[in-house]
Amino acid sequence: MSPSLLGQHLFFLSQIWSSSSDTYRVSISMSNRVITDTLAQSAKSRKHKKPEGTRSDGLDVGIISREAVGVVTAVGAGLTGVKVGDVVAYAGNPMGSYIEEQILPASVAVPVPPSMDPVVVASVMLKGLTAQFLLRRCFKVQSGHTILVHAAAGGVGSLLCQWANSLGATVVGTVSTEAKAVQAKEDGCHHVIIYTQEDFVVAVNKITSGKGVEVVYDSVGRDTFQGSLACLKTRGYMVIFGQSSGMPDPIPLSALAPKSLFLTRPSLFQYTETRDELLEAAGELFANVASGVLRARVNHKYPLSQAAQAHADLENRKTTGSVVLIPDDVKQ
């Protein structure tokens, strides 16, 4: 018989504008799945625009978020590698981590070392796995490289700067304010450019004595794309992993030819397609967090029942660092 999840409070996308939650009874198949009691989940700063014409109960938009840590309470028959009582984390698919009890494909459940704080893991899991594949696989940053990180004080940007610094790279970061410049320095940026005060292309050219950088990590998109290409050295890598300012305007392939540039738009999902890839990436992430190479800033914790307030504070810029949601019945 399939287990049922009784009395579970679920937050749907349309409900982050209110304090309500819904309770449902759900029957499931346990084939290749595990059930976890959620310990912590990360609240994202990404703004969710309320869909026009959606139903008031939110059922047509689904449960939000895709990153959590929990303790395993049930395991499908015949599964190995995970057992009841294990603390596991996941990031990516499936969508739906704003929930007290979660059903996960066993293939995405990553064992968390006992010494690690679930709140810290929840705050870095998705961002950290992203930083890992960007630095270690998409373009392998090495000692002696000079790299440019846009949004250096952001969630992924902060980890990129810390990690790249530990690898021996010279890190150049762009930020929008003096306060963010201070944080970027703390996170290992050797050169911080406040792009609201100076042209980052001119600044990078000066920093590198006209040579350019080996790789640009760009999560901004349209506003920085052309300038980022100009910052690259011959055979440099342009890595776009987000587009907070919108999608870049199209360019002809011939625009890459003068410096034989490489251009890629990677995604975490294609770099963790296999279980082995996922475990290797998570293992490296956890090791760097445990050793202090990577520092998480968990400055705000909210009960899951206050998810709407957490998102309101995020959108009104009342928070700094990571925001973590914790189910109301979890002891802290």
Image: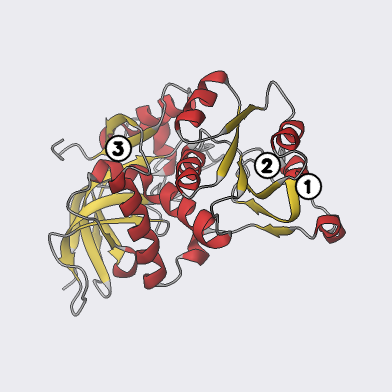
Amino acid beneath label 1: Asp
Tell me the number on the disc at residue 22: none
- Is 245 situated above or below 232? above
Give the residue pinned by disc 3. Answer: 325
Specify whether 304 is left or right of 269.
Answer: left
Residue 100 at x, y percent in the picture? 23, 47
Residue 233 at x, y percent in the picture? 74, 50
- Is 55 situated above or below 287? above
- Is 97 situated above or below 276? above
Dot 2: within a 10 Å radius of its alpha carbon, few (fewer than 14), some, or many (20 or more) residues?
few
Specify whether 254 is left or right of 204.
Answer: right
Image quadrant of residue 263?
A: bottom right
Q: Which of the marked residues, 2 or 3, is nearer the chain's N terminus? A: 2
Residue 98 appears anywhere in the view? no
Dot 1: within a 10 Å radius of its alpha carbon, few (fewer than 14), some, or many (20 or more) residues?
few
Image quadrant of residue 26?
A: bottom left
Quadrant containing the N terminus in the rendered view: bottom left
Specify whether 28 is left or right of 206.
Answer: left
Disc 3 secondary structure class: strand
Tell me the number on the disc at residue 246: 2
Q: Which of the marked residues, 3 or 1, is nearer the chain's N terminus? A: 1
Amino acid beneath label 2: Gly
Q: Disc 2 versus disc 3: distance between alpha carbons? A: 28 Å
Disc 1 secondary structure class: loop
Quadrant containing the C terminus in the rendered view: top left
Q: Disc 2 versus disc 1: distance between alpha carbons? A: 9 Å
Amino acid beneath label 3: Leu
- Is 5 situated above or below 243? below
Give the residue pinned by disc 1. Answer: 249
Residue 81 at x, y percent in the picture? 22, 72
Residue 138 at x, y percent in the picture? 57, 60
Q: Disc 3 versus disc 1: distance between alpha carbons? A: 37 Å
